[in-house]
Amino acid sequence: MKVGIVGVGLIPWRVRYADKTYYELALDVTKAALEDARLSPGDVDHVVWGLSDLMVAWVRQCCPSTTMQDYIGMAGKSSVHVSAGAVTGAMSVRQGMIEIMSGMSDVTLVVGSGKGMDLWDPEQNKRSSAFLKAIMLDLDTNWEVPVEPLAAANFGFAVQAHIDRYGAPTEAQMAKVSVKNHRNALANPLAQSGMELTVDEVMNSRRIAGPIKMFDCCLYSEGAAALILASEDRAREICDDPIWIEGAGASNLRSYMPDFDHLGRLPCQQQSARRAYSMAGISDPLRQLDFIETHDLLSGVELMSYAELGLCEPGQGGRLIDEGFTERSGPMPVNPSGGMIGCGHVAGCSGISRVGEIVQQLRGRAGGTQVPINQGRAIFSAIGGPGISQSCTIVLGKS
């Protein structure tokens, strides 16, 4: 059975939606996705909520999906809440696919929203740092949180281990990823951080952790995204250009970073990609994909992912960025949307949004970020969970 994506609802990434609750953001994208698919709420059988577990800390709501469902007009529908840190969005799409393939539903809404910048510190009279502190509760609170107090330090640990093991990438090569993704975002009206930067400007920005500078990092944001998934027969009835989920792979490894068997690698991403490729019949991603959207919470993580996704050998990611191979105009564009670095990121809806960006690319509706579509296939690969323990890769195609 094939599962198609027939509706997309996206809104701009922002530092803060001061005038919107997370309920309202979810409603906005749900309405947009239904309108895109020319459906009504009554046509939806099931809802998959992609809401980070950190919603509990951010909005003091233990079951946000339950309280939000009536608000978006889906009262009485069955639903499930997916939570897997930064992999939440991709895993939600996978769960929506499973729901339809099981025969339980014909039409499923996958929706997520994320806020965190409403948290206020009355003593300092400014935005609270509780948002960043809450993110670290995804990690092992006994062993990792005391020594890796920020997400940038956690991912930076893996980047530094990769450098120690392979002698690459250099900090200048990482800076080139930042330049690329910020520039790509200039053509994306939904992006938060589009800008023209030079390698020197990235290199001279404030150092955050190990080899990571400020412009090597994505910004935490607020946003929402929604997709409408449908069974093959319903998808063909709903629209003329459904985008099919051809493969979905996931992997969950140990969360404790120093206990990894392969320090400096992202084995969970390699496993999830291989499983997705196998399901989709992809044996040579360099020849069978048009472009890639992948996790770039840090620029160095994107370079590490090149090897895990089959674009090069480990340690050779820096060479690809030096050669312009992954530029929007290159042979294999990576993050033509701007990625997390250029667009923004909040766990939960971020991955749903990236899948939506791919759908628009494959439809030929990506506007200024559009890349040539020859093979009719692309992937989104997410990394996250506790530490760098989980990954989910989604293969999307036109055929």
Image (cartoon, rainbow, N blue to C red):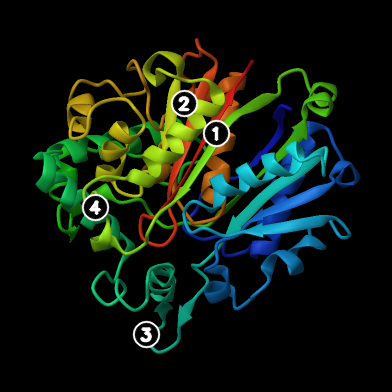
Count of numbered circles in the view: 4
Classed neighbour count for the residue bearing mark 2: other residues with Cα under 10 Å, few (<14), some (14–19), many (≥20): many
- Amino acid under disc 3: Gln
Evaluate if marks 3 and 2 touch, with contact meaning CB atoms under 8 Å apart.
no
> Looking at this view, is 253 or 70 the one in front?
253
**On the rendered structure, is 352 left or right of 46?**
left
The image shows residue 43 at horizontal and vertical percentages of: 88, 41
Q: Is residue 190 above or below residue 371?
A: below
Residue under circle 4? Answer: 158
Residue depicted at 37% across the width and 85% down the height: 124
Front of the two marks 1 and 3 = 1
Q: Rounded to the nearest whole Å, what is the CA distance between mark 1 and mark 3?
A: 38 Å
Mark 1–mark 3 contact, CB under 8 Å? no
Disc 4 secondary structure class = helix
Quadrant of the rendered image containing residue 143: bottom left
The residue tagged 3 is 124
Residue named by callout 2: 369
- Going from the N terminus, do you reach mark 4 or mark 3 first? 3
Q: Amino acid at mark 4?
A: Ala
**Secondary element at image label 2:** helix
* Residue 198 in sight here: no
Q: Is residue 87 visible?
A: yes
Label 4 environment density (alpha carbons within 10 Å; few <14, some 14–19, many ≥20): many
Q: Which residue is mark 1?
A: 357
User: Residue 20 is drawn in which quadrant?
Assistant: bottom right
Which disc is residue 188 wearing? none
Say whether disc 3 or disc 2 marks the residue closer to the N-terminus. 3
* Separation of marks 4 and 3 at Cα, in angstroms: 34 Å
